[in-house]
Image (cartoon, rainbow, N blue to C red):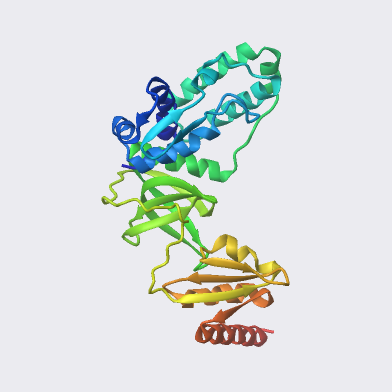
């Protein structure tokens, strides 16, 4: 079953207590106790060493595993009473207040966060008062993240208006969300009711989102291994090579690709696979003089023909 970000945070906090009481615990036993796979547990263990009691990078959790057993080397250090410097207290209070304003946050979680914030503010004294003059505003992706996270938690379907760069168009679709993950950008994996297939949606391309009353009921799917990246093109998908100038480097940002090689002039040679190469003609027209399709040759010629036709139609209107 998919886990949302808040549930994963709860699990990892519980994991710290669990491991402190069980030095040298076996991976399979811990995974079984938390109802997760061993791969999910290892993923959590990869994150925990980046957590600790200091924002400056000290006092981090020294936890590692040999794949069979889990060792925590500094539990006594972390157990010491937490003492925050003024800047640490201010940063924590500002972040806590910002998270509490996120749409889609469960009310019980919001109330618990506000109670903890009030206690921290009282303990921080003057530092806490100073933090009240600072605020953080989340961009639109934060709201999308909160709605997706809530939909996963409540097992509800989502309605999206989503921008597809390959087709340069907005589409409306209903999606049963499965999980959130980050690979450079933040993505939602879900079962798309429009295409009746598993799809991945980048959150900053969601133009509009709405939670529906319909329950989410994605089919049982094996989660993809993302350790080697997000893009796993099918072997039979045609390969397309595009060369862009410095002004066209944005293509590597918006289009999933196999590789992006630096060119001497500051441009990129981008290799990607797509089941529908013809959909890239529109990209070639958008690039204009900032890029060109190199292969396959028939697609390159098709793009040149489309450009000539577009220029001819433009001349006729003058």
Could you tell me which quadrant the N terminus lies in?
top left
Judged left or right of residue 41, residue 146 is right
Residue 264 vertical position relative to residue 199 in the rendered view, above or below: below
Q: Is residue 156 left or right of residue 261?
A: left
Front residue of this view, candidates 243 and 64: 64
Task: Give x and y (percent) for residue 32.
Answer: 28, 33
* Nearest to the observer: residue 146 or residue 200: 200
Considering the image in quadrants, where does the C terminus appear?
bottom right
Q: Residue furthest right?
A: 265
Quadrant of res 40: top left
Question: Is residue 132 visible to the viewer in this orientation of the structure?
Answer: no
Residue 289 visible in the shown view = yes
Residue 109: x and y in percent read: 44, 26
The quadrant holding residue 307 is bottom right
Task: Compare residues 146 and 77 and report the one nearer the observer.
Answer: 77
Q: Pinpoint residue 183: horizontal percent, then vertical percent.
A: 51, 51
Residue 84 image offset from top left, x and y in percent = 64, 19
Q: How many numbered badges does the structure rendering display?
A: 0
Decide: is 272 above or below 56. below
């Amino acid at each position: 079953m998919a886990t949302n970000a808040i549930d994963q945070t709860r699990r990892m906090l519980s994991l710290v207590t669990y491991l402190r009481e069980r030095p040298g615990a076996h991976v399979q036993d811990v995974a079984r106790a938390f109802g997760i796979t061993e791969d999910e547990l290892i993923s959590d263990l990869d994150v925990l060493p980046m957590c600790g009691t200091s924002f400056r990078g000290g006092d981090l959790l020294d936890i590692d595993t040999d794949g069979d057993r889990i060792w925590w080397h500094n539990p006594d250090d972390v157990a010491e009473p937490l003492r925050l410097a003024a800047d640490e207290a201010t940063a924590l209070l500002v972040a806590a207040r910002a998270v509490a304003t996120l749409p889609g946050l469960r009310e019980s979680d919001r109330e618990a966060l506000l109670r903890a914030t009030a206690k921290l503010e009282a303990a921080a004294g003057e530092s806490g008062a100073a933090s009240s003059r600072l605020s953080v505003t989340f961009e639109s992706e934060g709201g999308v993240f909160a709605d997706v996270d809530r939909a996963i938690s409540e097992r509800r379907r989502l309605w999206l208006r989503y921008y597809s760069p390959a087709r340069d168009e907005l589409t409306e679709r209903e999606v049963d969300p499965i999980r959130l993950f980050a690979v450079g950008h933040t993505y939602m994996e879900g079962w798309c009711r429009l295409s009746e297939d598993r799809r991945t949606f980048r959150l900053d391309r969601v133009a509009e989102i709405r939670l529906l009353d319909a329950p989410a009921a994605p089919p049982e799917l094996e989660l993809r291994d993302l350790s080697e990246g997000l893009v796993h093109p099918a072997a039979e998908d045609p390969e397309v090579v595009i060369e862009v100038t410095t002004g066209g480097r944005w293509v590597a940002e918006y289009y999933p690709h196999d590789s992006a090689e630096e060119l001497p002039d500051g441009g990129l040679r981008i290799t990607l696979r797509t089941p529908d190469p013809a959909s890239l003609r529109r990209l070639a027209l958008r690039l204009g003089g900032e890029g060109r399709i190199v292969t396959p040759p028939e697609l390159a010629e098709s793009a040149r023909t489309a450009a000539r036709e577009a220029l001819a139609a433009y001349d006729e209107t003058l």
